[in-house]
Image: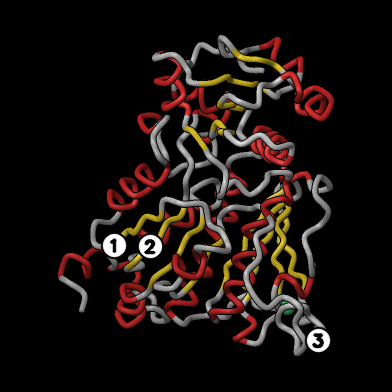
């Protein structure tokens, strides 16, 4: 099953008695879905590729930004402004052309999760955000696929494998529901030392490889905690909650749920959206409507797009009547979250032709005008 080139490539695996040629064949026949190609997904996918995991699926809808490169090592300087998926696929096949890389250009949601994950043996959650964490946990439970979890915060990281079908607990056994929106710092742009997701993402790759090859013991029922400042690894026991709302006998969660509202980002699926490239073209040709900026006065003072009307999001409930209801309204903010909220609010007030600018002024700076000052 392995070609002579592959046998040469994986020679160092063959001399491990636990793995050997049989284990390598299992890796070649194995498949992993990596959700996200960011800080955790980068090292995870790269080590899976190098190890010879036969099929690697990638889900991402972002573009490479200069501030990603400090930790998202799958992407390089020449890929700035381009889709992360293309960049990641290129890099993985450069590492190992003997594998298959499948790209899924989408946000991972309750609607598409089952279909995307269906062909894969294992899910790696490389996103480190609550909406995807709950979605991949629930998906793993409903489909009987192990979910390799990783998370980082400041100088600390965590790894576990959630696989109720293998006897362990699920994530909801610990935290039944996401904490209240706004109470969790990971939603904000928290700082991170780039090597930390490198370590945690590498541990995730290791667990996926162990599961596929059937070697060692996966950390089901165990939370591995890494403290970088004190250089300690500690294990915590995770117990199955007999009354778990997902994996217990009387579940209240019976299907996949989106927690998009969680970080204050509304579900944009039914919302009209425009990319910054499309907006730039439309502005050049004369915009068929008005462009509204809903950022704070401080952000507006630091940098603004020409010809925008400025109404901060928190003033919108008192000032929306300043906006014409018979014209197309394009709305932007810093990254697309607040403008999506503004679209939802205006829609509820009876405005019908609303378009959210995807990625906001940050995307504009990355893709259109790098001279625009940072707010
Ligand atoms: Zn559970």
For residue 242, which numbered disc appears in the image? 3
The answer to which quarter of the image holds residue 11 is: bottom left
The picture quadrant where one finds residue 242 is bottom right
The local crowd at label 2, few if under 14, some if 14 to 19, many if 20 or more residues have their Cα within 10 Å, is: many
Which residue carries the number 2 mark? 56
Residue 259: which numbered mark, if any? none
Q: Determine whether label 1 and label 2 are within 8 Å by CB.
A: yes
How are the residues colored? Answer: secondary structure
Viewer-closest of 105 and 221: 105
What is the number of the mark on residue 100? 1
Q: Earlier in the sequence, mark 1 or mark 3?
A: 1
Real-space Cα separation, disc 1 to disc 3, in angstroms? 40 Å
Side of 112 where 238 appears, left or right: right
Q: Earlier in the sequence, mark 3 or mark 2?
A: 2
Q: Position of residue 349 (x, y in %)?
A: 74, 37
Position in image of residue 64 (x %, y %):
46, 35
Name the element at disc 1. strand
Badge 3 local density, few (<14 within 10 Å), some, or many (20+)? few
Q: Between 143 and 169, which is closer to the camera in this rendering? A: 143
- Quadrant where the C terminus is found in the figure: top right
Indicate the quadrant where residue 17 lies. Answer: bottom left
Label 2: element kind:
strand
Q: Position of residue 114 (x, y in %)?
A: 50, 70
């Amino acid at each position: 099953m392995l070609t002579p080139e592959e046998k040469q490539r994986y020679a160092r695996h063959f001399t491990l008695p636990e793995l050997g040629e049989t284990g390598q064949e299992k890796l070649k026949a194995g498949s992993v879905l990596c959700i996200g190609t960011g800080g955790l997904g980068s090292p995870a996918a790269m080590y899976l590729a190098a190890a010879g995991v036969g099929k690697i699926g990638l889900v991402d809808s972002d573009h490479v930004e200069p501030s990603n490169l400090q930790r998202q090592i799958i992407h390089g300087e020449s890929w700035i402004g381009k889709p992360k998926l293309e960049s990641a696929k290129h890099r993985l096949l450069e590492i190992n052309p003997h594998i298959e890389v499948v790209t899924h250009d989408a946000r991972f949601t309750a609607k598409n999760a089952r279909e995307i994950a269906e062909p894969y043996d294992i899910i790696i959650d490389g996103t480190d955000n609550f909406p995807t964490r709950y979605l991949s946990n629930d998906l793993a439970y409903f489909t009987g696929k192990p979910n390799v979890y990783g998370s980082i915060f400041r100088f600390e990281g965590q790894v576990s494998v959630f696989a109720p079908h293998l006897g362990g607990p699920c994530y909801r056994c610990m935290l039944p529901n996401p904490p209240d929106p706004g109470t969790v710092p990971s939603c904000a742009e928290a700082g991170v030392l780039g090597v930390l997701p490198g370590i945690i993402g590498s541990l995730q790759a290791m667990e996926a490889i162990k599961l596929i090859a059937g070697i060692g013991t996966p950390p089901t029922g165990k939370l591995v905690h890494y403290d970088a400042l004190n250089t300690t690894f500690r294990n915590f026991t995770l117990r199955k909650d007999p009354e778990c709302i997902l994996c217990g006998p009387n579940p209240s969660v019976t299907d996949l749920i989106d927690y998009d509202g969680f970080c204050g980002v509304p579900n944009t699926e039914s919302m009209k959206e425009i990319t910054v490239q499309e907006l730039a073209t439309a502005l050049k040709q004369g915009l068929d409507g008005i462009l509204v900026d809903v950022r704070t006065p401080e952000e507006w003072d630091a940098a603004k797009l020409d010809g925008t009307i400025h109404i901060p999001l928190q003033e919108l409930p008192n000032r929306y009547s300043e906006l014409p209801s018979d014209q197309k309204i394009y709305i932007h903010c810093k990254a697309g979250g607040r403008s999506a909220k503004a679209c939802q609010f205006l829609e509820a007030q009876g405005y019908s032709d609303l378009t959210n600018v995807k990625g906001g002024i940050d995307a504009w700076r990355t893709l259109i005008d790098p001279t625009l000052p940072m707010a």
